[in-house]
Image: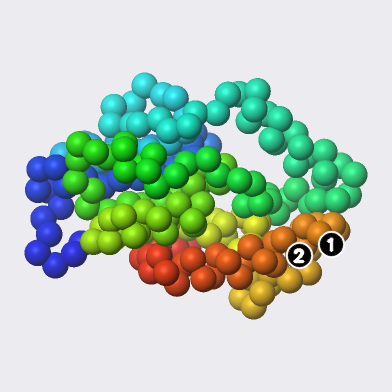
Amino acid sequence: RRRGQDQRCPGMTIVHVATELSGGAGGFVRHLHLAMQGMGLPSLVLTRERNELGGVGTLKPITRIKGSLRARSLTALGKVGLLDSSYAMFGIEKCPVSAADIQHAVTHIKPSAFVFYWTSYFVDFETMLALRRACPHVPIVLTCTDEAFLTGGCHYAHGCEGYLRSCSECPATTIAVLQRRISQRFVQRRALIDEIDPVVIYPT
C-alpha cells in the first residue's frame, strides 16, 4: 500500500491480471478474488477466459480449438526430441493484450495496483512497461507462481540456474535458433523489468 492511500477507498480497485481462472495458478487468482470480494475489498480480474464470476473482465478471449492447437504444437516438438515439454516453454509465445486494452478495461475505476500472475499467451513485459508509463503512480506487482517471470522462456527451471546468469544454452530445447531466441529474450526481459520496477512476490 502506498503511503496515505486507503485500500478501502471507493473506486480504488486492485486489478488482477491472469491468463486464466482455471488450473493451478488461475485457481489461486480466482480464490483470492472471491476472498477479497467477501471482505468487501474492490477487486477486478482481467483474463482471457470467459466465466460467470462477478468482477471479471474478459480480454482477447481464445477459442478452445486455438488453445488446443498451441498445446499440441509444443507437445509435437517434444515428441520428436526438439523440446523438453517438462520445462513448459510457454514464454516463447506471443501475447495479444496491449496496455491500451487494459486501460480501456479499467476506464471506470481507479486501480490501486496491477497484480500480474500467470500471463503466458496473454500479457508480456512490453505491455507491462507501456502500462507503467501510462499509469506511473499505480504499483505493478509480479506474483511468481512459477519461474516464468525470471527466465527467457520456461516456467519450470527443474534445477537449471541459467536464469541467474544469461539463459544461454537452454536445456529445454536442442534447436540452436530457439536457444538464441531464449537467450536474447532473457536479456530483453531483464531490461524491461528494470524499467517496470515492480514489486515481486515469490511464494515458497
Query: Quick check: 123 above or below 190?
Result: above
The residue that disc 2 covers is 180
Q: Is residue 70 left or right of residue 49?
A: right
**Residue 95 on image: x %, y %:** 55, 44
**Residue 113 on image: x %, y %:** 27, 54
**Residue density around tag 2, few if under 14, some if 14–19, many if 20 or more, within 10 Å:** some
In the current view of this chain or complex, which residue is farthest to the bottom?
165
What SS does tag 1 mark?
helix
Q: Measure how far apart labels 2 and 1 are at the Cα level.
A: 6 Å
Tell whether label 1 touches label 2 (CB within 8 Å).
yes
What residue is shown at x 61% (from left), y 46% (from top)?
94
**Residue 176 on image: x %, y %:** 84, 62
Quadrant (top left, top right, bottom left, bottom right) of the N terminus: bottom left
**Residue density around tag 1, few if under 14, some if 14–19, many if 20 or more, within 10 Å:** few
Q: Is residue 147 visible?
A: yes
Q: Is residue 150 left or right of residue 79?
A: left
Q: Is residue 161 visible?
A: no
Q: Label 1 sits on what residue type?
A: Ala
Q: Which mark is residue 156?
A: none
What SS does tag 2 mark?
helix
What residue is shown at x 82% (from left), y 45% (from top)?
78
Query: Quick check: 79 above or below 116?
Result: above
The residue that disc 1 covers is 176
Q: Label 2 sits on what residue type?
A: Arg
Q: Is residue 200 left or right of residue 107?
A: right
**Residue 190 on image: x %, y %:** 54, 70
Q: Is residue 204 left or right of residue 70?
A: left
Classify residue 156 by image quadrant: bottom right
Classify residue 52 by image quadrant: top left
What residue is shown at x 64% (from left), y 78% (from top)?
165
**Front position in the image: 95 or 168:** 95
What residue is shown at x 28% (from left), y 56% (from top)?
135
